[in-house]
Amino acid sequence: MPDIVLTTLNAKFIHAAFGLRYLFANLGDLQPRAAIAGFDINLRPLDIAETLLAREPKIIGFGIYIWNVEETTEVITAIKRIRPEIKIILGGPEVSYETEGQPIVELADHVITGEADLKFAEVCRQLLDHTPHSALRTPQFPKIIPAELPEFSRLALPYDFYTDADIAHRIIYVEASRGCPFTCEFCLSSLDIPVRQVPLDKFLTAMQKLLDRGLKQFKFVDRTFNLNIAVSKTLLEFFRARYQPGMFFHFEMIPDRLPAELREVIAKFPPGSLQFEVGIQTFNPEVGALISRRQNYERLAENFNFLRRETSVHIHADLIVGLPGETLESFAAGFDQLIALGPQEIQVGILKRLRGTPIVRHDAEWQMVYNAHPPYEILQNKLLDFATMQRMRRFAKYWDLVGNSGNFVATAPLVWNNGAAPFHNFLRFSDWLYAKIQRTDSIALARLMELLFEFLTREIVLDAKLVAETFWRDCQRTGRRDAPNFLKEFLPEENWSVIRERDRSLPKRQAKHLAT
């Protein structure tokens, strides 16, 4: 049985906990006495506690995040009532700031704040005293233990500790750098200064080993992938030279920084292989100034136009609702501007008040009111009252189902009638849909299709035959072989079961990424 168990509750089963593997990789001589145990938040807390206790550990290290803090509190409560002698060590962004008064912190023996890659091993070593069967020592550490910022040259990389099952079935996270040079007040990464680079030779060797083990999908968690252009180009060229069908690479990029040397290599990637997550957050320069976000909007537009016209990159762009100074009309203008730039996905996020972020300095002036429970989303502010924020929450949910799902690539633009005021037209659909069904989740795709058809043909009175033909093109694109019954009266009978050869040859996931 291991003396140390490293664990966390992932948001979904498919996520492989990156931080746990970094901690395990850097345990040194304690590695043989440790194990990783991953769970997800859909499991019952008592079942998780049972599994952990069955391993009879002396120390359990928990990774605490905004999505798992409440469930993990239940797990730790049960463990401490049954086996109070087990030492509980917490780490992660949710407990790295504003620790006072957090129930989960009160339950723990120690909390390591910041990047705990090396500090966790140091604490465990003192607790265990290298004697396998001895009682745990009282370490020379306080309850709250700040971790020094580790240099990458001192860190063992974690990639060997992804299992074959992880590689086959889960999202695999990698990082070539940590930190962010920007100071956006809503983001924890703005506190991670300076930006630190993984030694490139060491990193590429690790990536080659993952490729050799059959990994095809790489999700980079670097906050500023294209900050160091030379490194970015080297990484892209490395993966482009080793590309095999089915490979997919996800990067987060700065939207206004895409020089010619990067454009050249990006354009060489085949369709469906490259995705950029682009944080825009606001198109309002005054709001950007309020939250210390610098952005060149003209260059951003040029880069989007290049990516959409000259590459097959799938663009996932982010906007935030509820920023101080952002009115509904200001957000609407930004949303419409982004629609015109043509990213394949637009994530409409609701502002969160993450622990430690300086966004709190606006609370009084802009009357910012946040939910007291994770994920700490804004409830209202001076410019957007609670009822409006609720409308926007529904807008975001329905946009994800209709605008981002890949199921309505051709049909969704009909909502705003070929580009006229996309935001307000989709908000109208959102309000109508909620009035109809009074829910934003657990909506079957077939039901959603019927409702969207009803809205387009009865509420905004588009030609039913045109709408049906557009729907059927979307059905074919996503691989459906038979037309839904509600469309058949508007389609020629010979088209009810037609699948175009081009769409049949594409996996559904790639069809979504290729859709234009």
Image (cartoon, helix red, strand yellow):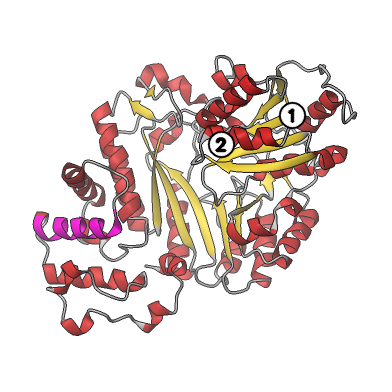
Q: Check the picture and name the quadrant holding the N terminus.
A: top right
360 sits left or right of 34 in the view? left
In the rendered image, the vertical position of residue 202 relative to residue 150, given as above or below: below
507 sits left or right of 63 in the view? left
Using the rendered image of the protein, determine whether residue 514 is visible from the camera's viewpoint.
yes
Which residue is located at x 56 percent, y 70 percent? 246
Q: Position of residue 56 (x, y in %)?
A: 73, 32
Residues in magenta, as a range: 444-458
Q: Residue furthest right?
A: 131
User: Magenta segment: does it hold 457?
Assistant: yes
Which residue is located at x 68 percent, y 67 percent? 214
Identify which residue, 257 or 494, lies in the foreground.
494
Q: As shown in the figure, which amino acid type bears the numbered disc 2?
A: Asp
Which residue is located at x 84 percent, y 27 percent? 128
Query: Which image quarter: residue 285?
Result: top left
Q: Check the picture and name the quadrant holding the C terminus.
A: bottom left
Q: Would you say the magenta stretch is mainly helix, strand or loop?
A: helix
In the rendered image, the vertical position of residue 471 relative to residue 113, given as above or below: below
Which residue is located at x 27 percent, y 27 percent? 386
201 sits left or right of 268 in the view? right
Using the rendered image of the protein, determine whether residue 385 is visible from the camera's viewpoint.
no
Q: Position of residue 123 (x, y in %)?
A: 79, 26
Residue 47 marker: 2
Q: As shown in the figure, which amino acid type bears the numbered disc 1?
A: Ile
User: Magenta segment: does it hold 437?
Assistant: no
Q: Which residue is mark 1?
A: 59
